[in-house]
Each structure stands twice: as C-alpha cells, then as structure tokens.
Amino acid sequence: MDFGFTDEQLALGATVRDVLRAHCPPAALRTERRPGWDQLAALGFFGLLLPPESDGLGLRLVDVLPALEETGRACLPGPVVETAVAAPYLVAGAPKLASGAVCVSVLPPGQAYAPDADLADLIVVAGADGLRLVAKEAVRLTPRPGVDPCRPLFEVAFDESERLSGPAGPALRRATVATAAQLIGVARELLAVSVAYAGVRTQFGAPIGSFQAVKHQLADVAVAADFAAPLVWRAALAVEGSAATADRDVSAAKAAAGEAATLAARVALQVHGAIGYTEELDLRFWLARAWSLSAAYGTTAVHRERVRASLVAGDLGRYP
Amino acid sequence: MDLDFSPAERDFRAEVRDWLSTNAPGPLPSMDTTEGFEAHRAWEARLADARLSVVSWPEEYGGRGASLIEWLIFEEEYWAAGAPARVTQNGIFLLAPSLMRFGTPEQRRRWLPRMARGDDVWAQAWSEPEAGSDLAALTSRAEPAPGGWRLYGHKTWSSRAAYATHGFGLFRTSGTRHKGLTYFLFPLDEVAVRPIAQLDGLPGFAELHFDGVYVDESMVLGEAGEGWRIAMATTSSERGLTLRSPGRFLATADRLVALARSAGDPALADRAARCWVEAEAYRLHTFQTARRIMAGEEIGAAASMGKVFWSELDLRMHALAMELLGERAGETPWLDGFLFSLAGPIYAGTNEIQRNIIAERVLGLPR
C-alpha cells in the first residue's frame, strides 16, 4: 500500500507545469490554437504512454496523472487526451505519433461530436460496426456550437475510412480517467484564482475572503477536489491492473471529478461576481473547460447511472 | 503508487475477520444504559484478551504495534462484522494519543492498559455552558493545593460521563484565552454528575460540577499551562482518521445500497450509489493520508476536510435510509444511527468551525 505519487511522477508533473506556465499563459488562449504543444512535444510528452517499439517511453497511466492534471490546470487547448492518451491504445503504429507531429481526435461512442477535430491529422470514429480511422484528407467537418471556445466541437462526415481491429475499451477507459485528471486540475486552478481574488477584492472595508459566507463555499470546493482526486488515481490503477471493478471505478472517478470541477466553476463565478461574468476575464476559459470536460467521455449523469447499475446489480466488491 | 495489501496485511485481515465471525456478539443494549454500559465494557475486555482492542498501540499497553494500514484494516473488518460501538472510544481515540505523546512513562503505564480493557472508561469534558465552538472562552479553573490542585467549575455535553469512571478536560490555571490552560485527568467519583438525555432519550451526555475536587500532580497531562497545545493535538486526532475511520462508513454504505436495492426506486438508488462511492472516496483519501503520516508528515488543518466529509456523508446516508424506510425506520437500527449521525456535524468541532479552518489554514484566506 503506497497510495501517493512517486518523486518521478511528481517531477514530470512539475516539468509540464513549468512548460505550460511559460508557453501556454492565459493570453495565449485568446490568440493561439495549440499554445505549448511544440514545447510539450520536445519534452516527449506525446510518447509517454506509447510502447518503446513506437518510440515511446512505455509509462503507465498513473505515471502521467500529475502531468495530465497540469494540462487541465493550464486549460491547455487541443486534443491532448486524444493524442497523448487515447491514440497510443488505438493507433500506436501511426508514424510520428511519439514526436507529437501527428494530432489525433476521437469521436467516442455515445458522443455526438469530435473535439478539436480541426487540428487532427487522424480522427478515430466510433460507429455501430466498431472503430474507424479517418484521415484528415477524407473528412468533412461541420463546426457545432459548444460551451468551450478552446475545445471546439465538430460533426464528422467521411467517405473513406479504415477499420481498426482492436477493442475501444482500453483507450476509452484511459481517456476517461485522463479527462477526470484534467478536471481535477481545472478545479484546483479555479479554486486557486478564486482564493487569490477573495484575498484582494475589498468590500465593506474588508477582503471578501474574510467573510464566512465566502470562506465556506471555497472550503466546500477544496473538499470536493480533495476527495475526488483519489478516486481518479484509483481508477488509473484499476484500469491498468485489470481490476474486476475497473469500469465502475472509472465512472466513479469521472463523475466525482466532473462534479468537483463544476462546483469549483459555480463558486468561482459567484466569488468573482460581475467581473467573472465577462468574456474579458480569463476565468471564462476555466469555467468553460469545467463544463466541456464534464460532458466529455460520458456526462456525469451517464457515469452516475453506470455506478448505480453496477451496485444495484449486486456488485459490492471494492478495489482494493 | 499502488493499492496492494501486503501478505502480512492480508493475513491480519483474515485473522480479524475470522475472530470476529465467531466472537462478535449480536446487538447489545445501548451503552447509555446501566446494563448496556456493562455489556459493552465486557465486550471490550474480550477484545483486549484477543489483543484486538487497540491494535495500533505498543504491546506493553495491550496493543500489537500494528501499522496504520493494519489499523484501518481492523476497522473495516470490525464494522463490516456489525460489532458493537466502542464504549472506550473517548479514551482510546481522543485521550490516548495525547497520553502517548505528552504523558510521563508512569502515566502511560498507569492508564493505558486499563483503558485498553475497558477497566477505566473515560469521558471527555471540553465544553462548558458558555464555551462550545469558542473553547478558549472556558472558565473552569484549577487552584494549587498541597501536592496537587483543586478543580472548580462547570462542564457540559460530556459524552459517556453518566457511566464513565474518569474524565479529561481543560481548566484554567493562569492567563486568559488559550494561554494558561492546563490539561487534567480526574476520577468521576467525586464530581457531581447530572446525566442529560440525548435525542434518543438516553443519557449519552452529562453535566459535571466541580466544587474543589482534589487531584494530585500525577493527574496533570503535560506541563501546567500547556493544555491548549495538548488538547489541539487531541482534537486533530478526533477530526482526523482515528475517531471515524472509513470502515464504519463502508459498512453503512453497503447496508444502504442493499436497502435501496430492495426498495426498487431508481432515484433513491442513485442517491445510495452516490453515498457508496463517497464512502470509497473517504477510504482512498485515508490511504493517501496514511501514507503521508507514515512518511512523518503532520496532517494538521487538513484533518478538517475529512471531518466535514465523513460527518456529512454519514448524515446523508442515514437520512436516505430514513426516507427509504418511512414509518418502519423505528423497527430497525437505522433510527439510532440516524440520530447519532445528526451529532456528527456538531461534535469534534462544528462543521462551521471546520470550514473556517479549511478556509484560513489550508487555503490561506484572511481571518
């Protein structure tokens, strides 16, 4: 029993954090489509989960959770989860994947639109007959309105595609856990900026963060994020250890992380007040990310329903 | 990172499970009755004979020197087996950590083994009529007397004091507010005890009146005037994982899901499933905390996050059971559990105080 990150896992997270602070600052979210990607690629970020025969490092999902949390904290645009986490289990043989030169989007089962498909060289589409791989040249994308300006959604149509023979499960479970890790990062950043603002915004002659009505809301966000995170870590271990409860553990993690992030967004907006309700404050990007990722790879309601169905069916086994 | 139990931990779990399956009694009468108190005390003696009453304590005091993880395993098995509530809990979970850390070797030898068997049962005496959440406002005092001290004042909401043999609490020996408080142990036989019935009609509380009760120097825990610091170390254990380990809530969550399944209402089943996952979240969070403690970290103010989480989860679970059972609730143990869960957000520092602590000391918001 050693339920915490190693120094190496934390160091990878810290490196990603430093890179994104330098190359994906909030201002870049307004002007660039993929800020920080070149620098992440130079670090080898997109090969972390790929096997050595695909020029990757062959790390486990749990090894990269702190790094993924940082991509959420930075509100990093682009199909990060799809390219760095899903693709290694869908199209590991695709050339140049490890180098970050190939960008992948995924249209998962149960979802209507592919995120960031405008950037994708390859799109993996789940259909009634399994997974299909579509090249950029063969796809017709129709933009759809969405909540997140940095994670645009596209309807995908295509004529030519290649059938992918492997199962979707390993990639989708990992992508769901990775999205949950990003949501934890989003929640923590929303909490941090709200705490900072509550410490400097003064009304009635005192910082608003000194008022209990504000304090208690922020405390609730801290509790929600702190208790959702271990569910995400556990899900990563369950998936890679092929635990019997892995699917339920993934759903429990995604639902809890999504709820923590949406609570953090709700409270962040309330603490900021009217300035938070504007397009000009950077907060809007994190609010949008909390909402968009909560709906990605299964909404919170879908995952809650999966957990309920498993428990009502009588499976009360726990991992560990 | 891993979530694997070692072979020794698995063996320990198997031993505890096996012992409880043959030794755990059925439901006992409430510990807040004369008969139930003695029955719970007898159960503690049986646990102690099997060296299972305080597994994490050193062997010389009746424990096994079990690791924190093994203690959590013990708790999971204990509550899953439906074993009795711990009549010794104020002593073994609240006082003992302070005794181990601040007590003299003589005090530890004198009190811990008896506490571990339920020979002495300890009541806590923190609150006063005008000092609840604002504990430092307390006015009970101790005056020097030859060879010791005389205690004066009025304590209330003292859990277990109606039947317990001993108490512990803070008395002012000098100064104001947090300064000049001293941590005293005292036998209850010379204290005027007025039992107070709780919501269930039984005297789980008592009021204590001290009219010059004499205690000798050996009944001071730590240095005179250091009581606040020592008490805070105790309350940190109370809020943290010693008082309410995950095992209790995992067992409740399993029973709740079974109840919801038989009721067949999908909306209520959804709430039960949510509680079940939250109990798992508390368990996993505790494994993470245990790792930090075993690495020598102080948990400090972060313990308040756990206290808010488990107390409100417990209340949600029992409130849902009441909804599921309707007017049949009184025929089941859920009613007593519900009443008990209502106290969770109040004792060990109200959840309002906990949220202040989280906001100010974890998040760094201005006071």
Image (cartoon, rainbow, N blue to C red):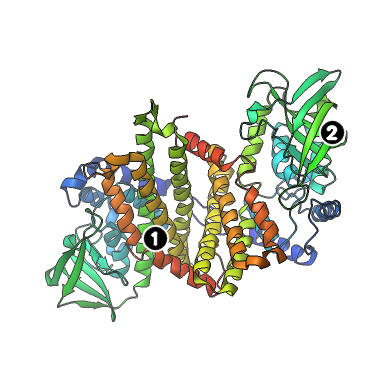
The chain that hosts pointer 1 is: A
User: For mark 1, does the 10 Å Cα neighbourhood hold few (<14), some (14 to 19), or many (20 or more) residues?
Assistant: many
Q: Do labels 2 and 1 share a chain?
A: no
Horizontally, is A157 left or right of B48 in the view?
A: left
Q: Which amino acid does label 2 sit on?
A: Val
Q: Can residue B297 be seen in this view?
A: no
User: How far apart are the two marked residues, 2 and 1, measured between alpha carbons?
Assistant: 58 Å
* Of residues B135 and A195, the one drawn nearer to the viewer in this rendering: B135
Residue in the image at 70% along x and 65% along y: B332
Are dots 2 and 1 in contact, CB under 8 Å? Answer: no
Kindly give the residue lying farthest to the bottom in the view shown. Answer: A129
On the image, the x and y values in percent for residue A52 come to: 32, 62
- The mark closer to the camera, 2 or 1, is 2
Q: Quadrant of residue B170?
A: top right
Q: Quadrant of residue A298?
A: bottom left
On the image, the x and y values in percent for residue A248 come to: 47, 67
User: For mark 2, does the 10 Å Cα neighbourhood hold few (<14), some (14 to 19), or many (20 or more) residues?
Assistant: many
Q: Is residue A29 visible?
A: yes
Horizontally, is B240 left or right of B105 in the view?
A: left
Q: What residue type is labelled 1?
A: Val
Residue identifier under label 1: A177
* Of residues B99 and A13, the one drawn nearer to the viewer in this rendering: B99
* Of residues B172 and B292, the one drawn nearer to the viewer in this rendering: B172
* Secondary element at image label 2: loop
Residue identifier under label 2: B191
* Secondary element at image label 1: helix
Residue in the image at 55% along x and 53% along y: B282
Q: In which quarter of the image is residue B142?
A: top right
